Structure formats: C-alpha cells, structure tokens
Amino acid sequence: MEVEVFSSAQTGQVQREVFCEKCGCNYSYEMVRRGRGEAMTPSGFGEAAAEQRAQAAAAASLNNLLQSQHDPVACPDCGWVQSYMVEAMRERAHRWLSRGSYVVGFLVGACAFFGFFAVAGIGGRSFQEDDLVRIFALVLLAPLTVIAGTAGRSFWSKSINPNRHYPQRPSPIPGAPIGVKRGCGPASTVTSAATTAGDASNTLSFNTVREPLVNAIAAIPEQPSVPSIESGGWVTLQIANAHYPGFCCSCLKATDGVSSFKCAQLASLMIPICPSCEKHRSANQTLFIIGGVMWGGCLTFLLTFFAPKSDLEASLKFAGFGAVIGFFVGAWLARKSGPVKFSSFSQELNTVRVRFSNPNYLRLLVDHGKLV
Ligand SMILES: [Zn+2]
Ligand SMILES: [Zn+2]
C-alpha cells in the first residue's frame, strides 16, 4: 500500500510591542514566522481531508510560533537587545548539535543492542568477558553522547551576546526586523521636535502641527538600517517582506519581468529577471539536466560493460540507475549555476541567505530594495 504525504506551509506576521529594559523606550517590530504541517493518507483515499489536515497543522504551528517567539531587535534608541530576545536567539542556535547527538546516541545504542544478539546468536559460543565489556561500553556511550551534545550546545549558545559591546550598537543581526520607535518620555521628545520644526508664532499653529509631528517621529527610522552583507556576498532576506528593485538580477536592465526562484520545499522568491536572461536561465537548466542524464547513463554503462564478467542486460540496468543520479546532479548543478543562489533557509523564521551571480544587483537591492 502506498502512502501519500501532504505538506503545507503558512506564513504570518504579528506586531510586537517592546519596552526597553535599559532606557524605558517603547518600540515595535513586525515578526514573521512560518508554520509547517504534514498529513499522510493511503494513496487515492481521503486526499482532500489529508490536505486540509496538513493545512490545519501548518496554521496551528504558525499560531504557536507567532505567540511564543521573539526576534532579536535592538532598541532604536539605545541599541540594547532585550534579555528575553537574547534568550530566544540562544534557544534557536546550534540546534543541529543536540539533534545530531540524539541520532548518534541512538545509533550507538542500536549497535549495542544488535551486538548483544549477534554474539548470543553465534552457535556454540558463549559470552566472553570482553564481549560484555564492549557491549556495556556502548550502552554507556549512548546516553553520554546525548549529554555531551546537549551540554556542548548550551555552552556554545551562551557565547551569543549581541549586547557584548553595549552601549555601542550591536552589529546587525542577519534577517532580523528593524525596530520602530514609539517614543520615550513623550513631553521631552515632542517639545524638542516642535521647537526644531517651526517658529510657531502663535499657539494655534503650534497646536495644529503638534499632532502630525508625533506621528512623524514614530515614522522616522531611528537608525539607518545597515544590512550586513556577509562574507562571500551573501545577504539574509525575510522572504515575506523582501522587495526587489525592478532591474534584472542578472544583467541589471530595467524590467517588469519576474520569475519564481525556489529556495526550499514550498518556498520561493519572486525576483526580477528580464525575458532574455530568463530564457537563458531555463535553456541552461535544460542543458544541465540533459547533460547529467547522458553522462550518468553513459558513464555507468561503459564502466559496467567493460568490467570483467559483464553482461549487456546488467549494464543497461546500471545505466538507468546512473541516468537517474545524473538527473539529480544536473538539476543541482543547474541551480548552482543560476543567477541566484540560496543557503541556510530557516523553516521557522522564513528567512534565507541569497547570493547573486551579479554582485552589483546586491548593491542595488541593499540601496533601493527591502531586505527584512
Ligand atoms: Zn533602549
Ligand atoms: Zn537580464
């Protein structure tokens, strides 16, 4: 019986209000999260219901993330990243280490288990002392691996501290949103703004300018956002908020054309690309895939055909297998050679690192587009 798996992803955002622990400022930021859900069903049976279950699971996971998480957003006034935000950063960091230690621990435990039965299964041979010592060592090693992984991760995560150089501003945190100030002690801010704004000759005009000014203060981005271009020309984007200037990401010609670039399962970015570069891109992709299939097929055919004791039928079977591998290698190379490359997609944060083969497009994006 075949089983079909349905996957669904949902992206949502919420406005987070923050009260700065250091300077008493109020600010806010927009937090984006992505929830994912999966549901299984036997092939050809209850597929619509399974799809709905996947969607409901994605919505529930999104809701949970939006309610429980925080982004590391520095206070626009003093640069302090709130302690609970730092805590959330540490919780998310290096997760692979503890997960990996569970996998390794499980494998070591499985080795002990199978080792025991392997020795027990050998006919006419009883347990010898060093068999037991080895098995016991493995049994002990399994939980130790998990403990070491978890402890190592927690120790490593503790070193994350964006406030290390406070009161100096923290270096920009890739993919994190930008805080917008809501005002501190209202009296002082408003009066200073009002005096700089105008030679208010009478009370009436002062009162009329007063109200919009408060809004204007809230709208001014306090710090020019300095997006961190990471080494190798990578930059982290918030997929839901990124805005790309209307120039081809490959040849930089002004264009209205956009194409979908897939960066992960159920996630893609709509990036401007002119029709001729898009044509070139899809032709390139086809070439890489056809090339991969041909090379994979021919190479395995020749290798197995000229091997000793070969026969044609077996070689053809191997060639088919080689062609399938060649297809995947070709598709992978096609993606690597495209005008946009991706790495470090974050399932929860909905962010991805992007690199353009034309580095000038990155400058355009940083200067005239929107990253987070
Ligand atoms: Zn502050
Ligand atoms: Zn172009």
Image (cartoon, rainbow, N blue to C red):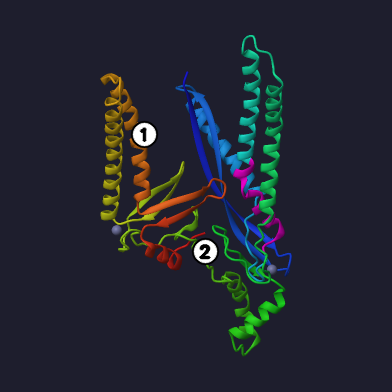
Left or right: 49 as drawn, with respect to 252? right
Left or right: 22 as drawn, with respect to 210? right
In terms of image quadrants, where is residue 216? bottom right
Position of residue 306 relative to residue 152, above or below, is above
Position of residue 126 relative to residue 229, above or below, is above
- Mark 1–mark 2 Cα distance, whole angstroms, equals 37 Å
In terms of image quadrants, where is residue 365? bottom left
Residue under pointer 2: 228
Q: Residues within 10 Å of mark 2 (few under 14, many from 20)?
A: some
Q: Which amino acid lies under the numbered mark 2 shown in the image of this protein? A: Ser
For the point 60% across and 64% down, which residue is it? Answer: 179
Q: Which amino acid lies under the numbered mark 1 shown in the image of this protein? A: Ile
Find residue 325 and name its label: 1
Residue range in magenta is 81-98
Find residue 279 and name its label: none
Q: Secondary structure at mark 1?
A: helix
Q: Are marks 1 and 2 in contact (CB under 8 Å)?
A: no
